[in-house]
Image (spheres, helix red, strand yellow):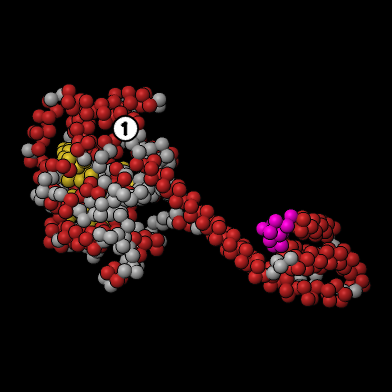
Amino acid sequence: MGRSGGGGGRPWVQSSNSRWRYLNPSYYLNRPKRLALLLIAFVVVTFVVWDRQTVSTADHLHQETNAKVQEAVHEELNYTGELLSATSFARQLVDQMLLAKAYVIIAKEYDNLKLAWEFSSHIRTCQRLLSKAAVRGQSITEVEARPLVSGLAYLINKAQDAHYDIATKLVTLRNHAQALEERAVAATVQSVYLARVASGAVPKNQYCLTVRLMVDWFNKPALKQQVDDLRNSPRLVDNSLYHFCIFSENVLASSAVVNSTVSNADHPQQLVFHIITSESNYHAMQVWFLSNDFKGSTIEVQKLEDFHWMNSSYFPVRNSENESDSKFSNPKYIPLLDHLKFYIPDIHPSLEKVIYLDDDVIVQKDLTPLFSLDLHGNVNGAVETCLEGFHRYHRYLNFSNPIISSQFDPQACGWAFGMNVFDLIAWKKANVTSRYRYWMEQNIDQTLWKKETLPVGLLSFNGLTEPLDRRWHVLGLGHDLGLDDRLIESAAVLHYDGYMKPWLELAYERYKPQWDRYVNLRHPYLIRCNAMEGK
């Protein structure tokens, strides 16, 4: 059977004007800074009010006659009007209190606790008087207001004599804001570092699984014959079938990707998976996929070391062994394996179209209609990620460098790796791999972008990417707790991008069921390994 029937009448196959919204994580990282800046603005506005009101306060106190006060006592009090009136005693007290509260903060900053206590005491007295006036329904009289206004005026003059002037306060608050920002940045750096360490660690139960599978490889010679037979299978190069590429060292994660894909396919026996891993995990991968049923799909496992034509010259990546803060210290970011997706046409020269899947995704819909999707001559079908300006080109690339700024638009829309449709015929025609090698050589000193592969992907596939409907690929399950449930339910592919991987203890519990659904936790290997770990 071929792919002609793969269209399946799905109304959202073609890319269109999708309107999903994503939350921006950077909003939460900048919160301390914004609070501090709001505090500065509050003090500035308050001082303007004080400078204006101080001159007029004494005059207003003398201008109000006892006759007017007595007349107001018998009138129904409009308390809102009192607070809004520039000539009422209530409004004057409120203005004085606002300024006094600012001085409380400043006095505490200078460790003048006595002055701060005196301000606080007068503020409480003002609050009691305002509450009393509101309850009795009568305006505050001059007799009641005069001692409080005078007392606060005395304390404010005392604070000014202590050099708590406007300039000093602004400098203090700016320093306070800067300190808060530095603490927030430090906390963020620490949390990212710890999350990176955690995400790079192999859980005990998965290490146990890998060891048990490797033991089986050496104890069961028949498995080697099965691998040899599979290498010669014509299905591996049959373009009437649906081919998927996965590059991973994680047995359980790769299994979840394959299992979820075949479980939701209309014709799983027409699916072919090409998995490439490192030599250290090769035998475990082979045993797992040969020993488990994946609904008749074909699964080929290869190891990177078997590609003798490929050496370090194919990956212009600077040696980073001496860099302490390097993604290359994380198994997820081994240079050769992580960059291997840019050589798919060289690895599979007979294939015409493939779907690339990261090992941290879960498939919820039949993906075969994507093979019938018209990419309009483009190479890469991908979901764009620029609904909020955070994910445009300027987010990933250094536009202060003329090599970048002279050739690319900083507002160009970014897209995501994780679920990509690659037309390998168009790829070869556009010579995308040569583009990749060129840009990697330009960035040998890492001045154009950091070590991730997405920036070089944006450059290599620039002008060659067809946007897909957003429901094909929903990101954020590894870092964003605010995703809409309806978006998750409608997604064809869920991507746990970020450090909160679903196979780790630090994963978000809200999103774990979607991944656990495709992991056979009752498998004998997993039961024994989980028991050893105490789960």
Question: Could you say where residue 497 lies in the image, as x and y percent from the top left?
Answer: 35, 48
Query: How many marks are shown on the rendered structure?
Result: 1
Question: Could you say where residue 4 lies in the image, as x and y percent from the top left?
Answer: 15, 50
- 65 vs 395, left or right, is right
Quadrant of the rendering where the C terminus is positioned: top left
Residue pictured at 88% horizontal, 75% vertical: 62
User: Which quarter of the picture shows residue 140?
Assistant: bottom right
Query: On the image, numbered disc 1 is attached to which residue?
Result: 206
Residue 174 falls within the magenta-colored stretch: no
* In the image, residue 105 above or below residue 299: below
- Residue found at the very far front of the displayed protein: 322
Range shown magenta: 102-113
Question: Could you say where residue 332 lies in the image, as x and y percent from the top left?
Answer: 30, 44
Residue pictured at 31% horizontal, 36% vertical: 518
Residue 245 in view in this figure: yes
User: Which quarter of the picture shows residue 32?
Assistant: bottom right
Label 1 neighbour load within 10 Å: few <14, some 14-19, many 20+: some
Nearest the eye: 531 or 106: 106
